[in-house]
Amino acid sequence: MGKTIAEKILLKASGEADVELGDIVEAKVDLAMSHDNAALVSKHFKTIGVERVWNPERIVILLDHRVPANSVQTATGHKAIRGFVSEQNLPNFYDMNAGICHQILPEKGHVRPGELIVGTDSHTTTHGAFGAFAIAIGATEMSTVWATGSLWLKVPETIRIEVSGSLPAHVYAKDVILNIIGTLGSDYADYKAVEFYGDTVSEFSIASRMVVSNQAMEMGSKAAIIPPDEKTTDYVGSRTSLPFTPVFADQDAEYLDTEVFDVSALEPQIACPHSPSNVKNISEVAGTPVDQAFLGSCTNGRLEDLKVTVNILKGKKIASSTRMIVIPASWEIYSEAMHKGYLKVFLDSGAIIVNPGCGPCLGAHEGILADGEKAISSSNRNFRGRMGSTESEVYLSSPAVVAASALRGEITDPRTIE
């Protein structure tokens, strides 16, 4: 029987002659990423009893969740991270002037097809968009990876999802993956790898593929892999000179399940409070007032997201009842948006532009919600209290819906905006 992409990558990482579903393998890690929680990881690392990390070149640390520091506690953690980076002489450290971890890793050439990537952030699945087996692990696990370069992993079952059809106007990758999550459920892929196929996925840009792999975590995916193609190799090759070997599933690979979606008639999707799987067609919730519209996050803070939003906002004003916050995913994107004139459109419309980082997505700062407030957000989670008060509500959508809703002060179908 043939093997899936996940099985092949774990086989290579294990160094074994063969692996089977359910096997526990000791896998060699290609890349280990931590963000602000590297302070906790380094604390655990210092209790292990080794003086140096296993390979400084394969560790990436970034500050993105609370930048600039939003409290003395955060500032203290950042100081500890900078000290550890200096002490260990880690070359791949990105301070608060870089951007969100899941954008920076591929942007700086740290993500390559066929590799095993681990990160202390649940949306590390994002990097499956490049044909990598990318998974989230805890701080204690990461400390042992820093010390040994390996960890135990169970070879997961794999689900195949096929998406076909040309997307209607103002329907995007975010709508596609929200529809999939809403249909299959939040626990459908618990500790399972998911592979995405179909002409719709093939047509997606790299940025749109990252949306799919990122948001797939919200249906429990251990890894969310899009097979690499020419778009993948062109992007990766433009960002790194290091060699890489794409991995593909065998024709006779065995899948736990195959799900098929036709998105040719899909309308904009909204994940309603308080779960990313509580998904409805926009026609069911249009007219819901919103106090805040947030464009950004590791899901939808890339240049194509800003462009879609600008095309809707240009020449118009945000509703007086609504505040709009825009956070580009990285400084590179911020700079490109500035040169293309996008930032001026945001400013002229009345939006607030914040430095690249996670900001209000995790309810840390730069736009948290008060009791009773509602937000429309391009981020990936809307759990109770996720963006502030436990008495607030968060609706997830594409950037186009965020922009249209900001203009009218209520959840709005972008197809109704002229």
Image (cartoon, grey):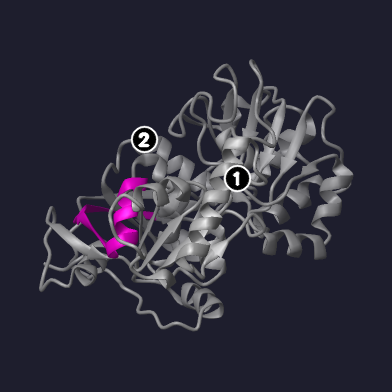
Quarter in which the C terminus is drawn:
top right
Q: Closer to the camera, 120 or 204?
A: 120
Q: What span is in magenta? A: 136-162
Residue 377 counted in the magenta span: no
| Camera sees residue 215 | no
Q: On the rendered structure, is 41 left or right of 273? A: left
Label 2 crowd bin: few (<14), some (14–19), many (20+), radius 10 Å: many
**Secondary element at tag 2:** loop
Against 289, is 330 above or below?
A: below
Residue drawn at 42 percent across, 35 percent down: 182
What is the three-letter code of the residue carrying label 2? Answer: Ser
Residue 186 - label: 2
Q: Mark 1: which secondary structure?
A: loop
Asked if the magenta segment contains residue 155, the reply would be yes
Asked where in the image residue 243 lies, by quadrant, the reply is bottom left
Quadrant position of the N terminus in the picture: bottom left
**Mark 2 or 1, which is nearer the eye?**
1
Say which label, 2 or 1, has the lower sequence index. 2
Residue 241 vertical placement versus 59 (above, below)? below
Q: Which residue is drawn at the image coordinates 48% and 28% (left, top)?
A: 383
